[in-house]
Amino acid sequence: MQFLKVIKGLRRFFPSVFLVIGLLCSSYSMARSQTEYPVYDSAQNYLNRLMPDAALELLLGIADTVDLSSDIGVKTQIAMAEAYRSKREYEKGFTTLYEVLDENAISDYNKAHAFNRLAALYDESNPKAENYFDSVMKYSQNCIDIAKQEGFYDLLASSNNEIGFVFNQQHRFPLAEQHFKKALDLYLEHGFNQHAVGVAINLAGNYIGREMYNEANATVDSAFNFVPKEGNENLWMRLYLQRAKIKEFSGNWQVAYQALSSARILQKQYYNNKLDETIVEMSAKYELDKQASKLTEEKRKSKARQREVVMLLIILIIASILFTLSYRSFKLKLKNEAQKDALERLEKKRLEEHLKYKHKEVSDAIANAVAYNQVMSEVKLAISHNDPKEALNIMNANINTQKNWQAFLLNFSQMHPDFFSKLELKHPDLTETEQKLSAMLLMELKSKEIAGVLNIALSSVSKGRNRLRKKIKLDASKELNDYFNRFA
């Protein structure tokens, strides 16, 4: 239990507090506890009187001194989970109980008790959750199965109370009433009168929900006889509050006001008593701390100067180390930044030179393509003059011109490898000539250069531009070059 270990570690700094609390607590004993730890019995008494903070202090003191896997250790953890439930610290309660149930060697009573308190946590923590009803019924039934077999009447009563509370939440009032009455009878029969008060309050709430105010009033009146007022102020306060609610709903405002006033008086008395107890505890702690302070004062004074010298030396050493590390880190950072800047400049220069080279290659390829087309024009002219020999000579002299166009495409693809694939994906209806024209426009070639590369007339270039603009649906105010840069 991680959070328990943390709490236990903190509690070791204040052992005197728990000693004083243990001496001040009464030795009230529950019928089922049967332990040799009167402090545990006092903690249970606080829980029954709805005083979780006082109970938790005692329980943490026990947890600090016993083996948590022992019987008293397990009982203490279950009681702590109940205190967390009362304080609405539900996650701590769940964690504690699940770890208790993971123990291999655990008595039947402790197992049934853990199931019962787990059902109570589900009952109270999140009644709107989807698994709320199933979880309460599951763990209550687990408790009932063991309690019936072993005769644990207090746990049998408690599980019936939890089931009744679930049915009450679901407005299944008759079923809830049956379970509340069964729990109430079991508690009273076996002497668990403080628990019986809580069930009586739940039963009265059941009657209020059904507008059975006479039955609700009779239930609360009888509950006042279960426990004496002295030492059970919290329980009596809850009874008065329930009576005030009954009288309010039944229209008896005067009695409701009187009951509410009585509840407020008890509440004030409870907090005053708690304040007195706290003052006594703090006074005792102050006296103990004062005595301890006197015993250690002389030693503290004699060692104070030595500690100061040691601390100053440590601070100087740490400061020196930190300064050295910071200076080295700063120098290393400057060196790394300088190297990074140098590498970035070199890389930028390399890319610029590479780009310049690629542009030159493309320009050369364009020039070769233009020359090739000029040669073809000369061949065409020779053929038109019926001079095939001259045409053959011209072709033989320029047999490698076609390879220049392939070189252009190769270099263009290296500069813009995804251009044609992106263009075709966006405009799959473009012809091969229109794709080539798009590439020329991306390279910002002039119309004359485009005509030379594609071996077409200047007017055809202009017409090709217009057809291309219509196909890609580009507004006349926008440049074709800017548009094709998207695919570069």
Image: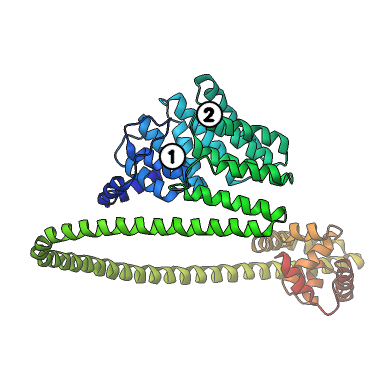
Front residue of this view, candidates 50 and 311: 50
In the figure, is residue 8 to the left or right of 292?
Answer: right
Q: Nearer the viewer, mark 2 or mark 1?
A: 2
In the figure, is residue 8 to the left or right of 94?
Answer: left
Front residue of this view, candidates 63 and 467: 63
Residue at the spot 72% in from the left edge and 52% down from the top edge: 250
**Residue 129 visible at all:** no
Q: Position of residue 65 (x, y in %)?
A: 29, 39
Q: Position of residue 185 (x, y in %)?
A: 58, 31
Label drawn at residue 79 = 1
Check the image and name the residue furthest to the top.
149
**Residue 167 visible at all:** yes
Q: Residues within 10 Å of mark 2 (few under 14, many from 20)?
A: few
Which amino acid type is marked by label 1? Ala
Q: Earlier in the sequence, mark 2 or mark 1?
A: 1
Residue at the spot 58% in from the left edge and 41% down from the top edge: 222
Q: Position of residue 301 (x, y in %)?
A: 10, 65
How many angstroms separate mark 2 from mark 1 (CA)? Answer: 23 Å
Q: Residues within 10 Å of mark 1 (few under 14, many from 20)?
A: many
Q: Quadrant of the C terminus?
A: bottom right
Residue under circle 2?
Answer: 189
